[in-house]
Image (cartoon, rainbow, N blue to C red):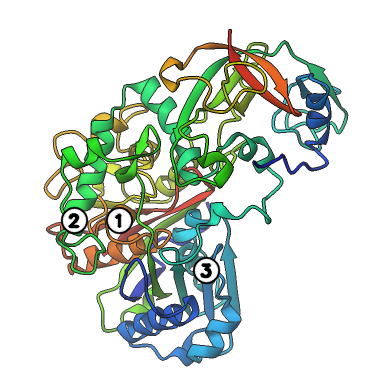
């Protein structure tokens, strides 16, 4: 391997976010501007110094509009990562790579969505993608919940994962949201009875297995480790970063290869740990992409916290709670803080390593953040 | 109800389905079956392909039961089942579909409680779409 690569070469020095709600009055672009400016203010860096931006798809605001509005300088690196929620961590990874390679000095990554008050993407029938929709949608497999429920049923069948295991995920996220005043579900506790008697969305997934639908925006600022020392906040280093698109993978409907239950997490994890100085046992806290509860046990397997098929059992005995084996989604995650395509998980990872989370894991020094499992994905290993 | 928006690769599947035939794309060189169809073989990189008839026998690999909110034509039939069927000849070839009481029956014509992973099914055809009946 040539040189140290990305390892600890860059740091996240600023984070920003808007309010999260089912409906916010401002439009997507305005929310993006507010989150980006808040992140730059947190970093103590002027907008005119920004020369790199990274975003991900399914957002209407492009970098030209954002740059004009907030007053960025001349941009020499800009990129957009595909596959919706799979791209969250990759935005930071791309900025880290660009800055390490000397292509830019100050990078901003952001996410703005009107997913709470805007249209649900699956209701679009005119812009139906020909592939693979022709193999799924005519049969009524219409929504992301249906597509992932298919994998969840098979996963439960093969490994004895139960609805109680999925509830453990939903509950841990909700408990953390109940500690986080910014979370949509701050004042709404969840009980096992509520979970077990809630309405189905797509059996075997019920209402509480599904993420929220949220309006909101977040952003973060990435600079070199040298520059980070001059910033007001404690730097949170990008220790390792990875993307993962496994051979023969099909996004969301990964039904067509030898082993559909080993998804993109496995590919990203191999790269991530190969480039890290630590192992899953060293991770103090994790932010695991949770558009659906079932993605969490699958991701726990993929990132090496347990063996194949043990993701459900891993969630038992409060393992995902504060004080448990691996506290997860300490701001509430997509299930209970806000569903902003996973960017709130990135910022929550930064808060944990600054020591400022509303559900702080004592002494947290290493945090794994993951992007959407079930689609071409990405992950970050952050260290203080 | 949504009809398949086909493309160059998928077109032949739907043309055969319209004639009541279930066929799967296979490499014209090494013979490896592949799904969904694509321009060349991921195993030997050959661009030659053929459409091989299969028996239509399979087993349920997994299934879901969607509930509203759904698109109107589907919401009206919900809850209904959607299955992934593994073909008997090639367990890695899996087709999304619906288990129905008989060809042309509604999506909700089989009680989801009758479905099991591993259940044997047989392909039937209606309106150009493959469907599945319990075998």
- Which element carries disc 1, helix, strand or loop? helix
Mark 2 or mark 3: whose residue is earlier in sequence = 3
**Residue occupied by mark 1:** A333
**Residue occupied by mark 2:** A176
> Crowding near pointer 2: few (<14 within 10 Å), some, many (20+)?
many
Disc sitting over residue A82 in the figure: none
Asked whether residue A72 is in view, the answer is no
- Residue at 36 percent of width and 51 percent of height: A211
> Crowding near pointer 3: few (<14 within 10 Å), some, many (20+)?
many
Mark 3 or mark 1: whose residue is earlier in sequence = 3
Q: CA distance from mark 2 to mark 1?
A: 8 Å
Counting the numbered discs, the total is: 3
Q: Residue furthest front?
A: B76
Q: In this picture, is A332 found above or below A35? A: above
- Which element carries disc 3, helix, strand or loop? strand
Tell me the subunit letter for badge 1: A
- Asked whether the residues under the numbered discs 2 and 1 touch, taking CB atoms below 8 Å apart as contact, a structural biologist would say yes
Whether marks 3 and 1 lie on the same chain: yes
Residue A245 on image: x %, y % = 56, 45
Tell me the subunit letter for badge 3: A
- Asked whether the residues under the numbered discs 3 and 1 touch, taking CB atoms below 8 Å apart as contact, a structural biologist would say no
Q: Nearer the viewer, residue A230 or A84?
A: A84
**Residue occupied by mark 3:** A55
Mark 2 vs mark 3, foreground winner is 2
Q: In this picture, is A261 found above or below A105? A: above
Q: Residue furthest right?
A: B48
Tell me the subunit letter for badge 2: A
Whether marks 2 and 1 lie on the same chain: yes
Q: Quadrant of residue A255?
A: top right
> Crowding near pointer 1: few (<14 within 10 Å), some, many (20+)?
many
> Considering the image in quadrants, where does the C terminus of chain A appear?
bottom left
Q: Nearer the viewer, residue A60 or A245?
A: A60
């Amino acid at each position: 391997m040539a040189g140290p690569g990305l390892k600890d070469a860059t740091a996240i020095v600023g984070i920003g976010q808007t309010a999260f709600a089912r409906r916010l009055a401002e439009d997507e672009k305005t929310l993006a501007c507010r989150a980006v400016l808040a992140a730059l203010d947190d970093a103590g860096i002027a907008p005119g110094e920004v020369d790199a931006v990274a975003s991900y798809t399914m957002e209407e605001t492009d970098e030209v509009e954002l740059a004009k509005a907030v007053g960025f300088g001349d941009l020499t690196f800009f990129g957009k990562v595909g596959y919706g929620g799979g791209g969250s961590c990759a935005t930071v990874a791309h900025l880290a790579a660009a800055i390490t390679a000397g292509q830019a000095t100050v990078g901003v990554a952001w996410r703005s969505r009107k997913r709470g008050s805007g249209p649900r993407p699956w209701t679009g029938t005119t812009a139906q993608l020909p592939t693979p929709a022709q193999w799924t949608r005519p049969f009524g497999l219409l929504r992301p919940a249906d597509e992932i429920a298919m994998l969840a049923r098979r996963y439960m069948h093969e490994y004895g994962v139960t609805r109680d295991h999925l509830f453990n995920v939903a509950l841990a996220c909700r408990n953390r949201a109940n500690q986080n005043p910014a979370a949509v579900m701050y004042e709404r506790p969840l009980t096992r009875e509520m979970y077990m008697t809630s309405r189905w969305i797509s059996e075997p997934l019920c209402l509480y297995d599904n993420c929220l639908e949220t309006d909101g925006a977040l952003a973060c600022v990435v600079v070199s480790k040298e520059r980070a020392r001059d910033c007001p906040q404690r730097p949170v280093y990008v220790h390792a970063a990875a993307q993962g698109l496994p051979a023969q993978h099909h996004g969301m409907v990964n039904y067509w290869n030898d082993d559909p239950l080993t998804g993109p997490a496995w590919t990203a994890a191999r790269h991530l740990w190969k480039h890290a100085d630590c192992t899953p046992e060293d991770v103090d806290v994790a932010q695991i992409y949770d558009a659906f509860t079932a993605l969490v046990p699958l991701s726990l397997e993929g990132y090496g916290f347990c063996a194949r098929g043990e993701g459900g059992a891993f969630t038992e005995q409060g393992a995902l709670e504060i004080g448990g084996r691996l506290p997860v989604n300490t701001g509430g995650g997509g299930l209970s803080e806000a569903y902003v395509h996973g960017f709130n998980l990135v910022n929550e990872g930064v808060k944990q390593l600054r020591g400022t989370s509303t559900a702080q894991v004592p002494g947290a020094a290493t945090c794994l953040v993951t992007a959407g499992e079930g689609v071409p994905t990405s992950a970050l290993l952050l260290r203080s | 109800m949504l009809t398949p928006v086909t493309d160059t690769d998928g077109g032949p599947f739907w043309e055969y389905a319209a004639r009541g035939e279930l066929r799967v794309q296979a490499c014209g060189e090494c013979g490896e079956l592949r799904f969904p169809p694509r321009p060349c073989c991921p195993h030997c990189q050959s661009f030659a392909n053929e459409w091989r008839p299969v028996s239509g026998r399979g087993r349920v690999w997994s299934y879901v039961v969607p509930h509203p909110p759904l698109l109107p034509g589907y919401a009206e039939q919900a809850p209904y089942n959607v299955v992934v069927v593994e073909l008997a000849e090639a367990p890695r070839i899996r087709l999304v579909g619906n288990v129905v009481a008989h060809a042309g029956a509604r999506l909700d014509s089989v009680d989801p409680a009758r479905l099991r992973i591993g259940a044997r099914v047989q392909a039937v055809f209606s309106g150009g779409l493959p469907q599945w009946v319990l075998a």
